[in-house]
Image (cartoon, helix red, strand yellow):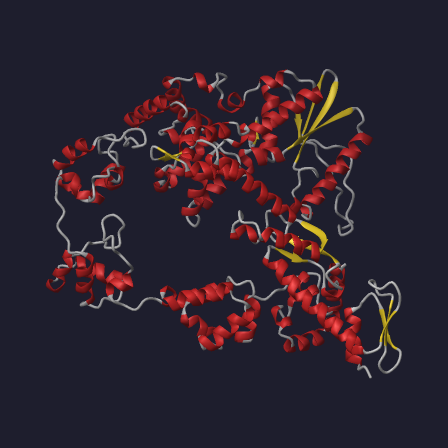
């Protein structure tokens, strides 16, 4: 006779059917989705084997799909065999594709692609997704085509790329990675084709002086550039923004943001605008001498939401610009986004969806309440994606087609922002020097990005301007423009012995007290210089070889490198033999080429994570399965507590956190986990509904089941909808499940 537990188990596996016991050994399944007629099983063991087989195959299929970069989205209860149509989702963040298919079809595609020889191991991880397979096929085809091209043909292909992708080296490499990788491999006279192409396009080079900028330097830099938003700075000069934010994040970067990037700077003729897109439209209208009204009220109201207070005043929608041309009234709206240009992962953004509802409400009511007004729509997403030049072209096109302004096409972006109507290609050295004088620019990097790009395309004007600015402001000329011959450097420095000290030399160089063309680091600038003191004609003392130095150092039994360096520089007699060893023995240029590591050099025991055993353990902790890693921690390492495991090495704990199953491993090995989940999606997928009927039942079930211990015991406190009653938790979970 079937027990109640067995019958409940069958019902959970067949939720769409009705199960009843006809006799002691017969089970009848009615209205099963896979059965055309009523099915009767004479022995309940047949049903049990059917359930067990489906469960085992489910686990195998799920693991196979997961190892190839996707996951199965439906629950086990909705799976009845290989022919069931299941929903799959790609785990690649940039793809995020979801589709419906049977496991048999997906498995056939995976098997077919695994037999291909021209795909890498990294590409094999994403072959379950059809969109990823299409991208892999396209990438491999392009790589084969570019590989068979000559150097001249590759350069022609790079020049034929759409011009908006040629704003910088980074954008080119991001959008055309296959072409840029092949160009980076090809070498011509010691330089790659990508470097030669970057020089041809006049793209920005790395500016080492930005690393030494002080607060005043960054303040002057931002004052001259006059950026309106952080996003504009990031697009215009991403390297400078990255250096300033990363090196000075906890010091004066916050003060610079508060001073330069606020809405008060988005002003024109005393009117404050909400974004750079609105500011550019205002500049265009002012350039055309059109009088307009900004941020006026439409005259109708937004609908009240259900959760709004009754006493709250109704809100007026505002338009961006209103003007009149030839007795016709036009209202320009600069929209944040539209439904056509939303990405896949933005379709669920509540803020954007709410904005789109407001946009449709505005457009509908504008036609009803103001039929005499012509509504002109401008998309600000173009400014965010492609920059202000592309956005200006969009504004010109909209104004020309919808309003009939032909003179808007005569507006040049440079003249709109630089104040000089002449094209930059006709500028000479005197014009650039005048611009530097008017804007108080002391270096070429202080000029606007458009002027810098123009200078990079004309090297002669760039070098001449750099020399003029260096002479006027009294700072050393950058070696990018001029590098003094080594003979001049040696002749000058040999007369001043104090320059043999590297710190003294670099301080004088930064103060601009050395001749133009002298490099800041002579060892990096000249291949024949091995040590800094060589520029003063001082021969370096002979040092003992690496193996003799290692034997000598190990006699002193130093605990670490800091103690060794202090002892070597000391004047005590017992440490005099250490003077025969390089001051920085691990330096790649002025040290030992046979260098291994400090532990081997000093004769100390290697750290655990650098040993062979430690490296193997880290690999297991990162990539192993739950059973494998848990048994390794408890048996091989002998750790039953988290504190014992942390004492072995902090690197081991970090490696364990990188494992995708870190939660389950910590629960099995240590009995608990610190990284507890509290989001409602995980709760709905993991916990059965009957285990959440009351708070007491939930706490009892969580103490028994290891799977439930992944979830925070009082997860409901993280959600404001709780309000102190467990019924509210059930309502939220049911709503979320639907």
Image coords of residue 642 (percent x, y): 48, 73
- Left or right of 541 on screen, residue 626: right
Relative height, residue 375 to residue 262 (above, below) = above
Kindly tell me whether residue 289 is visible in this rendering: no
Query: How many numbered tags mark residues here?
Result: 0
**Quarter of the image holding residue 547?**
bottom left
**Which quadrant holds residue 397?**
top right
Answer yes or no: is residue 333 visible.
yes
Q: Is residue 70 left or right of residue 34?
A: left
Q: Nearer the viewer, residue 159 or 602?
A: 159
Q: Position of residue 89 (x, y in %)?
A: 66, 53
Which image quarter holds the N terminus?
bottom right
Residue 506 in percent (x, y) is at 24, 41
| Lateral position of residue 321 relative to residue 144, left or right | right
Residue 366, image x and y in percent?
Answer: 78, 31
Left or right, 213 with respect to 157, comes to left
Between residue 528 and residue 191, name the one nearer to us: 191
Quadrant containing the C terminus in the rendered view: bottom right
| Location of residue 610 with respect to 277 vertically, above or below | below
Vertically, is 303 above or below 609? above
**Residue in the image at 25% along x and 55% along y:** 594
Q: Quadrant of residue 344?
A: top right
């Amino acid at each position: 006779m079937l027990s109640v537990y067995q019958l409940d188990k069958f019902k959970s596996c067949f939720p769409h059917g009705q199960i009843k016991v006809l006799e002691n050994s017969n089970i009848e399944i009615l209205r099963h989705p896979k059965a055309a007629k009523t099915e009767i099983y004479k022995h309940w063991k047949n049903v049990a084997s059917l359930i067990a087989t489906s469960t085992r195959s489910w686990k195998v299929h799920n693991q196979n799909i997961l190892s190839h970069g996707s996951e199965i989205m439906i629950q086990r209860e909705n799976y009845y065999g290989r022919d069931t149509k299941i929903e799959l989702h790609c785990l690649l963040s940039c793809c995020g594709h979801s589709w419906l298919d049977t496991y048999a079809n997906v498995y056939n595609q995976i098997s077919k692609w695994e037999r291909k020889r021209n795909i890498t191991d990294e590409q094999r991880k994403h072959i379950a997704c059809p969109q990823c397979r299409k991208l892999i096929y396209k990438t491999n085809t392009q790589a084969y085509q570019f590989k068979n091209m000559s150097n001249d043909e590759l350069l022609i292909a790079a020049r034929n790329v759409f011009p908006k992708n040629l704003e910088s080296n980074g954008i080119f490499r991001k959008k055309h990675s296959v072409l840029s990788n092949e160009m980076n491999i090809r070498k011509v006279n010691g330089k790659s084709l990508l470097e030669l192409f970057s020089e041809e396009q006049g793209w920005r080079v790395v500016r080492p002086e930005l690393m030494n900028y002080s607060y005043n330097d960054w303040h002057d830099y931002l004052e001259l550039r006059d950026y309106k938003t952080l996003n504009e700075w990031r697009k215009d000069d991403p390297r400078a923004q990255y250096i300033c934010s990363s090196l000075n994040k906890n010091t004066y970067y916050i003060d610079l943001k508060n001073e330069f990037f606020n809405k008060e700077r988005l002003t024109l003729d005393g009117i404050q605008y909400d974004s750079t897109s609105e500011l550019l439209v205002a500049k265009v209208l002012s350039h055309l001498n059109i009088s307009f009204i900004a941020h006026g009220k439409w005259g109708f109201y937004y609908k009240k939401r259900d959760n709004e207070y009754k006493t709250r005043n109704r809100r007026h929608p505002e338009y961006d610009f209103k003007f009149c041309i030839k007795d016709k009234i036009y209202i320009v709206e600069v929209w944040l986004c539209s439904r056509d240009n939303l990405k896949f992962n933005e379709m669920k953004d509540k803020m954007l969806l709410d904005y789109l509802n407001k946009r449709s409400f505005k457009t509908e009511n504008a036609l009803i309440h103001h039929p005499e007004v012509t509504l002109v729509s401008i998309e600000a997403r173009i400014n965010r994606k492609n920059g202000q030049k592309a956005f200006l072209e969009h504004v010109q096109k909209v104004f020309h087609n919808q309003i009939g302004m032909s003179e808007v096409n005569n507006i040049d972006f440079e003249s709109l922002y630089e104040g000089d109507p002449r094209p930059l290609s006709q500028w000479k050295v005197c014009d650039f020097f005048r611009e530097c004088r008017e804007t108080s620019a002391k270096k070429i990097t202080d000029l606007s990005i458009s002027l810098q790009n123009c200078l990079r395309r004309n090297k002669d004007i760039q070098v001449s301007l750099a020399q003029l600015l260096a002479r006027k402001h009294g700072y050393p000329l950058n070696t990018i423009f001029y590098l003094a011959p080594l003979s001049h450097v040696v002749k000058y420095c040999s007369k001043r012995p104090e320059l043999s000290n590297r710190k003294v030399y670099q301080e004088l160089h930064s103060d601009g007290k050395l001749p133009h063309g002298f490099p800041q680091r002579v060892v990096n600038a000249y291949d024949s210089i091995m040590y800094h003191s060589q520029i003063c004609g001082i021969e370096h003392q002979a040092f003992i070889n690496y193996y003799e130095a290692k034997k000598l150092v190990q006699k002193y039994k130093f605990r670490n490198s800091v103690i060794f360096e202090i002892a070597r520089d000391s004047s005590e007699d017992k440490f005099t033999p250490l003077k025969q060893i390089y001051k920085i023995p691990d330096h790649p240029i002025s040290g030992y080429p046979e260098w291994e590591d400090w532990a081997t050099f000093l004769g100390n025991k290697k750290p655990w994570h650098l040993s062979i055993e430690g490296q193997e353990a880290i690999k297991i902790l990162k990539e192993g399965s739950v059973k494998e890693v848990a048994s390794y921690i408890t048996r091989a390492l002998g750790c039953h507590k988290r504190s014992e495991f942390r004492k072995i090495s902090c690197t081991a704990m970090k490696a364990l956190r990188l494992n995708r199953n870190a939660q389950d491993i910590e629960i099995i090995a240590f009995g608990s986990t610190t990284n507890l989940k509290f989001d409602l999606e995980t709760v709905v997928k993991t916990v059965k509904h009957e285990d959440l009927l009351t708070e007491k039942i939930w706490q009892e079930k969580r103490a028994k089941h290891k799977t439930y211990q992944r979830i925070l015991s009082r997860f409901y406190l993280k959600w404001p909808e709780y309000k102190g009653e467990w019924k509210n938790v059930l309502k939220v979970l049911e709503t979320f499940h639907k």
